[in-house]
């Protein structure tokens, strides 16, 4: 299976449009509120705080998936909340990073639909919009993306009681480029914030677990590579047998297993 985010790298992309996408393509804000990770603007993005996101659509009527939303030009990193009903809430939470080659976010199939599925099974899901270093004209680096996911983990922990979440059971999941990002964050759990914005930045960004879906920093291009540190959280790997993006997953599995890092 070739990940959806890999398809985003083709040269047949329609031009992204500015402004909010059609309402029918985004979750209902009353049921799925959006929380900005830095209410006063993300560090390094203050000058772009008012710039609109862009979107495009993908799919075809023949494939019955012509409602796939793809987001780009993210300058205000945020979480879209998919909270389970209290009667079935398990206390487990997952921050989810969609893929898109660090140029865009395939947020329907690798975000919103995953969040809906998890919340229906008692797991709180938080869909992350993170800054994109490979987008044309981007001034961001992978460090901005890492900071966004670290801040997302800390934000969920900081509001755990409000969202019926156990702060010791906050994990992360990423698809394709989002898998690389999740793995980087999982490997860099000892990172501290150089210039904390508030009390949230004092919390640990170590995830309870990490799920890397057809994307990993342990076999990624050099600029995205990470080493397996001692004490890294349990790791779940998933890829398709015919997916060239994940061809090195067996090698990564052995690397993690030999280090007793996979559950």
Image (cartoon, rainbow, N blue to C red):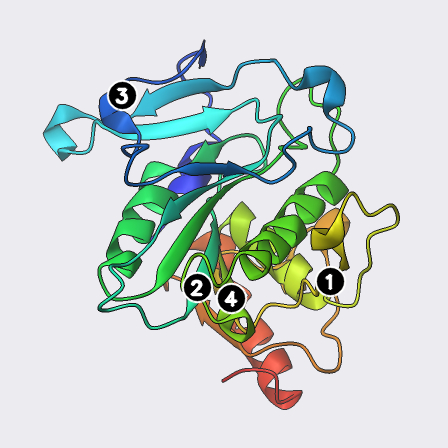
Q: Does residue 81 appear left or right of residue 225 in this picture?
A: left
**Label 4: few (<14), some or many (≥20) within 10 Å?**
many
**Label 3: few (<14), some or many (≥20) within 10 Å?**
few
SS for tag 3? helix
Contact between labelled residues 2 and 4, with CB atoms less than 8 Å apart: yes
Quarter of the image where one finds residue 67: top left
Residue 95, compared with residue 228, is above or below; it is above
Q: Earlier in the sequence, mark 2 or mark 1?
A: 2
State the image coordinates of residue 249 (x, y, percent, origin top left).
52, 68
Q: Earlier in the sequence, mark 1 or mark 3?
A: 3
Q: Nearer the viewer, residue 31 or 9?
A: 31
SS for tag 1? loop
Q: Earlier in the sequence, mark 3 or mark 4?
A: 3
| Residue receiving disc 2 | 93
- Quadrant for the N terminus, please: bottom left
Disc 1 versus disc 3: nearer the observer: 3
**Label 1: few (<14), some or many (≥20) within 10 Å?**
many
Disc 4 versus disc 1: nearer the observer: 4
Q: Does residue 175 appear left or right of residue 186 in this picture?
A: left
Which residue shows up at 44% across the image and 66% down it? 165
Residue 38, compared with residue 251, is above or below; it is above
The residues bearing labels 2 and 1 have C-alpha atoms spaced at a distance of 24 Å
Q: Nearer the viewer, residue 89 or 162?
A: 162
State the image coordinates of residue 216 (x, y, percent, origin top left).
58, 60
Residue 23 marker: 3
| Residue receiving disc 1 | 226
Q: Earlier in the sequence, mark 4 or mark 1?
A: 4
SS for tag 2? strand
| Residue receiving disc 4 | 171
């Amino acid at each position: 299976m070739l990940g959806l985010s890999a398809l985003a790298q083709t040269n047949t992309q329609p031009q992204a449009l500015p402004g909010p996408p059609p309402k029918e393509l985004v979750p209902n804000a009353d049921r799925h509120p959006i929380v900005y990770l830095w209410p006063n603007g993300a560090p390094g993005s203050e000058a772009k705080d008012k710039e609109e996101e862009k979107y495009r659509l993908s799919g075809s009527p023949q494939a019955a998936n012509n409602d796939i939303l793809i987001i780009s030009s993210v300058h205000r990193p945020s979480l879209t909340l998919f909270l389970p009903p209290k009667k079935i809430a398990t206390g487990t939470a997952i921050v989810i990073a969609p893929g898109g080659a660090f140029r865009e976010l395939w947020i329907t199939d690798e975000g919103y639909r995953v969040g809906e599925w998890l919340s229906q099974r008692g797991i709180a899901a938080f869909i992350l919009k993170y800054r994109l270093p490979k987008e044309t004209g981007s001034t961001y680096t992978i460090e901005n993306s890492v900071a966004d996911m670290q801040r997302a983990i800390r934000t969920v922990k900081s509001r755990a009681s409000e969202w019926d979440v156990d702060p010791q059971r906050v994990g992360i999941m990423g698809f394709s480029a989002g898998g690389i990002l999740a793995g980087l964050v999982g490997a860099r759990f000892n990172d501290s914030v150089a210039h904390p914005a508030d009390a949230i930045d004092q919390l640990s960004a170590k995830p309870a677990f990490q799920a890397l879906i057809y994307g990993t920093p342990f076999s990624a291009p050099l600029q995205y590579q990470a080493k397996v540190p001692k004490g890294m959280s349990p790791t779940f790997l998933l890829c398709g047998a015919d997916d060239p993006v994940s061809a090195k997953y067996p090698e990564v599995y052995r690397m993690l297993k030999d280090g007793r890092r996979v559950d």
